[in-house]
Structure formats: C-alpha cells, structure tokens
Image: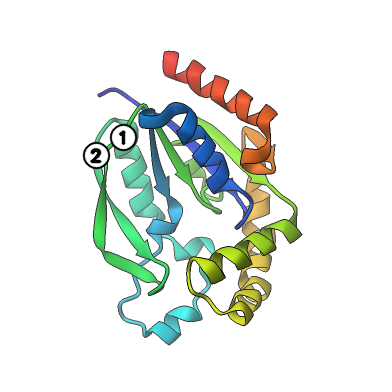
C-alpha cells in the first residue's frame, strides 16, 4: 500500500470533533481509519487511582508524542501499528492494544495534536473545530458524567483548574497551525462539504 492521506482534527474538549469525524466516516466509510490522541496518554501504573485523578491530562506533557509520531509515520507509509488503548474509567493506559491498519485516509484527532510541529508536519490537512466555550463545557459535563462515570463536582473542578487554563495556554494558540477552522463541528454543512471535496481531491491524486 502506498502513502495514505493524514488528516488532523483538533479543537477544545467538547468542541464537536467526534461529530465531525462521524460525518466524515459516514461519507467515506471503509476508506477512513481513526486514531485518537487520548489513547497516547502515558501509562501511570506506578500511581494509585487517587493519584491519577489529580494529574493534569490537558497539558502536552501528558501524551506520549514520541510513540504517536512513530505510529503516524508508519501509518502514513501504509504500515499497520499496535495502537495503545486508554481506559477513562481507570484513568490509565489499558494493557490491551488495538491493531490499526491504515485505509486511504487516516484521521488523527485530539485537543493538542497541533501543539507540536513534528506532528503537524505529518498531516496533509489540519482542521481546527471551534465552538463557544459555554457549549464546550456543557458537552464535556454531559460526556464525563454519562459516559465516564465522573462526579459532577469533580468535572467542574477539573474544568476550572486544568481544562480551561490549558485550553487558553496550549489548545487555542495551536489554532494558528490549522489549514481550516470549522465552527460548530459536524453541524456546519458548508464546511463539511468543503472537507468532503478536499478528501475526494486528495484521494484522487
């Protein structure tokens, strides 16, 4: 298999990245492989659960970008990789891995994938999803409480102490590295059609 198209989709927590990716996958189906930056959180087997709860998961140093860089390089050239799997309930990297075989397009998504130049250099198209901060926090609260079993007070406190300041310090400034800024993610039909056309064009080259 030859070189594949790598698309980066970044944006703040709760910005609508997942919805945008779902729309792309719905359009192109089996031609899309998705890799999440969240799966590349460092393992912390040396820490207790209570200690892991206190870590700052919104800082660039929380991620094993060396491993992600290696995997994206290999996926880009058509090679399969064993991707780590992150357990949000245990707040630690799982012992399991996931075999990722690249299709024609590999999407890598995460809040901080545009914060490091070497990762950006591996992406053919870089899309930043931008959504109002109030909407993002509401989506994050619902997700963390409903899907990840988090306590409401804990979610709000985490947003106040790490999510918001890290967004302002690292996530939002990385927007300048994007090729395209999409407002409201998968709900923006005009931007979606532009993305679809760009993917079709790149895939035809």
| For residue 170, above or below residue 203 | below
Q: What secondary structure is found at the residue carrying circle 2?
A: loop
Is residue 72 depicted above or below 146 in this figure?
above
**Which residue position is annotated with label 1?**
102
The answer to whether residue 32 is left or right of residue 59 is left
Give the quarter of the figure containing the C terminus.
top left
Image colouring? rainbow
* Rendered location of residue 78, percent (x, y): 28, 31
Q: Residue furthest top?
A: 205
Residue depicted at x 57% and y 40% = 20
The residue under the point 37% across, 28% down is 31
Disc marking residue 32 = none
Relative image position of residue 137 (x, y in whole percent): 68, 63
Residue 64 visible, this orientation:
no
Circles 2 and 1, Cβ within 8 Å, touching? The answer is: yes
Query: Viewer-proximal residue, 170 or 84?
Result: 84
Residue 188 in the image: state x and y as whole percent.
68, 35
Residue at x-position 24% and y-position 61%: 96
Q: What SS does tag 1 mark? A: loop
For this orientation, the residue located farthest to the front is 146
Confirm whether residue 93 shows in the render. Answer: yes
Q: Is residue 111 above or below residue 197?
A: below
Few, some or many residues within 10 Å of mark 2 (<14, 14–19, 20+): some
Q: Which residue is mark 2?
A: 80
Q: Name the image quarter holding the N terminus.
A: top left
């Amino acid at each position: 298999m030859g070189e594949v198209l790598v698309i980066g989709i970044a944006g703040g927590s709760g910005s609508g990245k997942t919805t945008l990716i779902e729309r792309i996958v719905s359009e192109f189906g089996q031609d899309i492989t998705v890799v999440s930056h969240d799966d590349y959180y460092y393992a912390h087997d040396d820490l207790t659960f209570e200690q892991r709860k206190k870590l700052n998961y919104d800082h660039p140093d929380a991620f094993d970008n060396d491993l992600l860089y290696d995997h994206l390089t290999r996926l880009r050239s058509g090679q399969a990789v064993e991707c780590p799997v992150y357990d949000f309930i245990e707040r630690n990297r799982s012992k399991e891995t996931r075999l990722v075989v690249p299709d024609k397009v590999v999407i890598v998504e995460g809040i901080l994938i545009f914060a490091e130049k070497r990762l950006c250099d591996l992406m053919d198209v870089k899309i930043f999803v931008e959504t109002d901060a109030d909407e993002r926090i509401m989506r994050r609260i619902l997700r963390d409480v409903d899907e990840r079993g988090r306590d409401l007070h804990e979610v709000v406190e985490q947003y106040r102490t790490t999510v918001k300041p890290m967004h302002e310090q690292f996530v939002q400034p990385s927007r300048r590295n994007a090729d395209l800024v999409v407002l409201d993610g998968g709900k923006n039909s005009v931007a979606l059609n532009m993305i679809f056309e760009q993917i079709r064009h790149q895939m035809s080259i």
